[in-house]
Amino acid sequence: MKDKNIKKQENLSESEIERLELLRLVNEKRGKQLTIDLETGGLNEIDELKQMLGKVFESPDEKYNIYYKGIRNTLMTYLPKGKEFEKVREIIYDEKNIFLSLGKKKSDNDGIRGGDGRMTFQPKMNEMLDLIIKWVSESQNPFVLYTMLYNLNEEMGYGHENYDDSTRGFANAMKKLSEEV
């Protein structure tokens, strides 16, 4: 009915009336989008807000599997074991956790990180798992893994833990050893 009134008042062509109708419909329906059904040529409404809120952005089961069965299990399997390698593992885990917690460091908050890598965004977990898989397939040298994690944190602008003098020297030695390998 409105189409006929608009056409009579302004002598508009069919395509101009169609454009005006589309503009009117879009203006009326906030949060909804009009799409053209290619099979029928008709217009369909999509409620974007309902679709966005109903969409699962993160899967708790998938995050659990990535973190515990992927990242953690692989590191526990391939990093050297024993008391003598405890500092090596600690420094590597710190670099991993800085990345997963988006730059939060224990040294910034009197030994409390203020973030949990297990709760990070799923794409970050996937990126960490990909890096660890690459390390396992190419090297399995803990010094190389440390350098990969160190460089990743540098690239992201996250920085690194501030250790005491003995640990800082150990971390620097690890970096130097990885460059020699």
Image: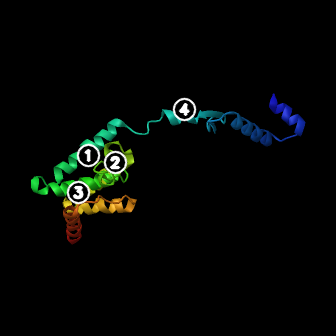
Tell me which corner region of the image, top left, top right, bottom left or bottom right, holds residue 18.
top right
Q: Residue at x 24, y 70 (%)?
A: 179
Classify 97 as above or below 34. below
The residue carrying mark 2 is 125
- 10 lies left or right of 160: right
Q: Which residue is mark 3?
A: 91
The residue type indicated by label 1 comes to Gly
Indicate the amino acid at tag 2: Met
How far apart marks 4 and 1 lie (CA) works out to: 33 Å
Q: Residues within 10 Å of mark 3 (few under 14, many from 20)?
A: many
95 left or right of 25? left
What's the residue type where badge 4 is placed? Answer: Lys
Identified by mark 3, the residue type is: Ile
Which residue is the extreme one toward the top?
A: 1
Q: Earlier in the sequence, mark 4 or mark 2?
A: 4
What is the C-alpha distance between the residues marked 3 and 4? 45 Å
Q: Can you identify the residue that label 1 sits on?
A: 70
From the top left corner, tell me how far across and down residue 167 is, in percent: 20, 61
